[in-house]
Amino acid sequence: MRPARRCALVVLGVLAAVAVVGGGPARGAPTADALAAQRAKVLAKDADDLRRLAKWGDDNGLDRTADADWEEVLRLDPEDAVARKRLRYLRQGKAWVRDAASWALVRAAPDARPAARADYAARRRAEVDLPSAARHRDLAVALRAAGHAAEADAECRLALARDPDDVWCRLALGEVPDPVEGWVPADVRRRRIASTRVDAEVRRLRAMGVEPVRDDAPGPRSAAVGKPLAVWRLRDWVLETDLDDDAAAAALATADLGARWFRSRFGIPATEPLLPGEGRFVVLAAHEDYVKVVEAEPNLVPAVRTFAKSVSAVPLPRGKRKDTVVLMERPEAVFAVDGCLHYAIHVLFRERFGVEAEEAWLYEGLAAYVTLRVLGTQASWCIALEETRAGVAERAPHAETWGEQAVELAWSRRDEPLKRLLFGSLNELDGPMLVKAWSVLRFLLEDHPDEGIAFLEARRDGGGSEAALRRATGLGVDEVDAAWRLATVAHEGE
């Protein structure tokens, strides 16, 4: 792993920790009292500048335009008697309330000299916005020197609200220039570049696709079903099915696309086999035919046979054979395409990196990540999100909105901690947990690809996800979780 790339995630982990607990003060940093006094002076000067501007508006026929600035003056200085009087507040006991009737009459009258608004706007930028931005920037510098990173960032955002061109505050918040949108957070820019590259690679692989070939002879499970099953072949994969030719070809071509993406993503040479044998999908349209095939499979213990009949897809125990066989009930072409890709990803990550179903977040999260990347949607699940038929897979969370769901989880903190996620079983994994698993893996594999691949390699070499994350990133699980949260909020659902 290149140390420079690893540092990116370590730095993000440190930033996440700072955002939560704040950094330590620098030597000679301002005291808390000095910072409070400086902040009070900044707010008082903001109020003075706004008060002067609003008064100019009143004197030059821009009463309605000035209303908002008088409101801001009163927010900054609640004891300002001039602003209270101007905004029609009256004293009732110990409280100040607005005279709603007279204020409604005032608000009904428009600016007397609307042509002066351009002058008002120019004065506001020169006499209020730019000086205020500079003051808040100076306060941010002092806060950061004192180790108050979160408060410093808040002051930077206030400065940018006054002056969006403040480069120091942009850089202090970790933003970078984007040729289209101007300044954006660094991780968002990095995410967009990575996402564009991944999408471009998928398009390239699609353009290089090869058509499956159908065998002349029927499949070996034809006798069990009582009708001929077609056999299709394409590189690492074989499909035995009663679906029509178009559906069968599309399903096998998509599994092959996933395998070619896998080979490209992890730099596996074309001469190196992906699987020890062949990957065989047996896809039946009707439930009764699926059950017949399950019943006819040799060497299945009764418990496995019963379980297989209760679900819509099951990988068969491999035993001593090299081949991998997955039985599926998929009545429609779209579900067959999705199902073959889904289980192809399971098989590939198991053979290359030792990812088994017992490590549920990784097993199912990787399938979700690749399927969404290759297909743009997902309709197959190995967890308790669906019933026992592919036709009701839409009961699962809407995959196209997972970016927004991940941001909502990160903002609200209603997500399961990553440490809890790492040890959940397939039966415990639910929709929000799967969304977070997908989002964490995307964060690792796209935002920090060197660490992501190192994590998978560490998993293959032995040990669980917790130890592998530590080896690959230099961070503990809680630190990776904090770094994911910080980055996810910055991405805002991308």
Image (cartoon, rainbow, N blue to C red):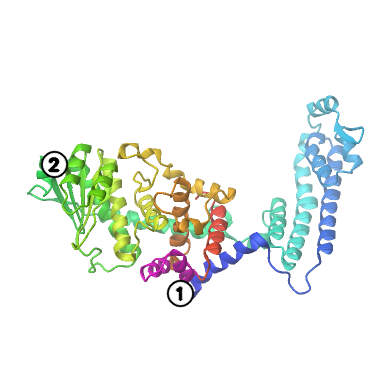
How far apart marks 2 and 1 lie (CA) works out to 54 Å
How would you rate the neighbour count of disc 1 (Cα within 10 Å): few for under 14, some for 14-19, many for 20 or more?
Answer: few
Circle 2 crowding by C-alpha within 10 Å: few under 14, some 14–19, many from 20? some
Compared with 69, 410 (above or below) is below
Looking at numbered disc 2 in the image, what kind of residue is underneath it?
A: Val
Return the disc, 2 or 1, that comes first in the chain's sequence: 1
Is residue 370 shown left or right of residue 413? left
The residue beneath circle 1 is 2
Give the residue pinned by disc 2.
Answer: 225
Q: In the drawing, does residue 287 fall left or right of residue 29?
A: left
Query: For the point 82% across and 25% down, which residue is it?
Result: 105
Q: Is 14 located above or below residue 363 in the figure?
A: below
SS at mark 2 in the image: helix
Q: Tell me, yes or no, whether the highlighted magenta stretch contains residue 468.
A: yes
In the image, is residue 460 part of the stretch drawn in magenta? Answer: yes
Residue 91, image x and y in percent?
Answer: 91, 33
User: Which of the 4 image quarters holds residue 320?
Assistant: bottom left
Q: Residue at horizontal 82%, vertical 35%?
A: 63
